[in-house]
Amino acid sequence: MTPLLEVDGLRLALGGPGRLEQELLHGVSFTVGAGETVGIVGESGSGKTLTIRAVAALHPPSARIDGDIRFDGRSVPAMSPRELTRLRRDHVAMVFQDPHAAINPVHRIGDLLTETYRRDGRGQRRDATARAQELLHQVRIKDPARVLGCFPHELSGGMLQRVMIAAALMRDPRLLLADEPTTALDVTTQAEVVALIAELRRERGTSLVFITHDIELVGALCDRILVMYRGRIVEELTSAQLHDGKISHPYTEALLACRPDITRRRHRLPAVPADAFEEGWAAQ
């Protein structure tokens, strides 16, 4: 069976007039099956966000892309602007890291949720409003009708992230891209949002790519885990392999070792030896 998403040898470089072009993604390849959850984990700057933004063609306009990204067998880089709009509207949705930065602050929540229906007839707009209220209820927001009339600054970070999840689900996307959706939240709210995403994904059968710094979180949430470092996938694991400690790359081990542990005292953070990657990369 053909995977829903195929990323094949993706290379992405950024530059510009008078600037030296720099390659930031180096041959990234992975697949996501229908209904599958794949986690991408790594430190800041490893290329996680660039990768999933490229999947939705949301990378910087000046970027040069080589390789291919195929959604349901169709090449995303080869799509026309109209086809890309349809892809993002109907099939691929994204939940961003900072909900405040992703929402127009002068628009009400109801406008955010129903904006893709504005050009439709009044009947469809009424249906969209009813669906928005239903989704806000599903993401456990009390009094959805009141929240639709609120501005973003009137909601807490946790509530706003729930609104973003509801907005992403308005068109029943086949693929949900979640870019560190819990980073700006407190620990309790983080757990609630992650549980909510997992529950909605199971109920709807939506494929999910989940980005985070937390390798144990993706181990609990995802079917497969991709470990990224310096624009490369250095290891791919199943959740069972992670839980059983069947890890082959020192960077993955270092990510696990950096997790806080109240039973041990560390004077220095673990570091990966500089030569740990040379043998593996030389073969690429």
Image: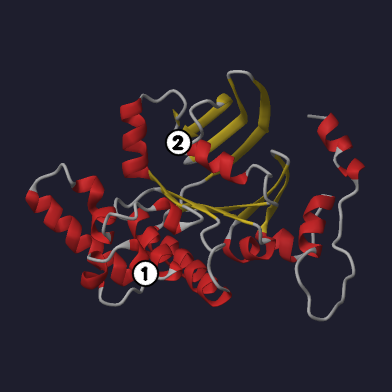
Question: How many dots with numbers?
Answer: 2
Furthest-bottom residue in this view: 263
Does residue 158 appear in the picture of this structure?
Answer: yes
Vertical placement of 224 versus 259: above or below?
A: above
Vertical placement of 151 versus 67: above or below?
A: below
Q: Residue tagged by mark 2?
A: 71
Disc 2 residue type (three-letter): Phe
Q: Residues within 10 Å of mark 1 (few under 14, many from 20)?
A: some
Does residue 1 appear in the picture of this structure?
Answer: no
Disc 2, SS: strand
Residue at image coords 46%, 64%: 197
Residue at image coords 88%, 71%: 266
Q: Position of residue 22 (x, y in %)?
A: 68, 27
What is the number of the mark on residue 103?
none
Q: Position of residue 24 (x, y in %)?
A: 66, 33
Furthest-left residue in this view: 122
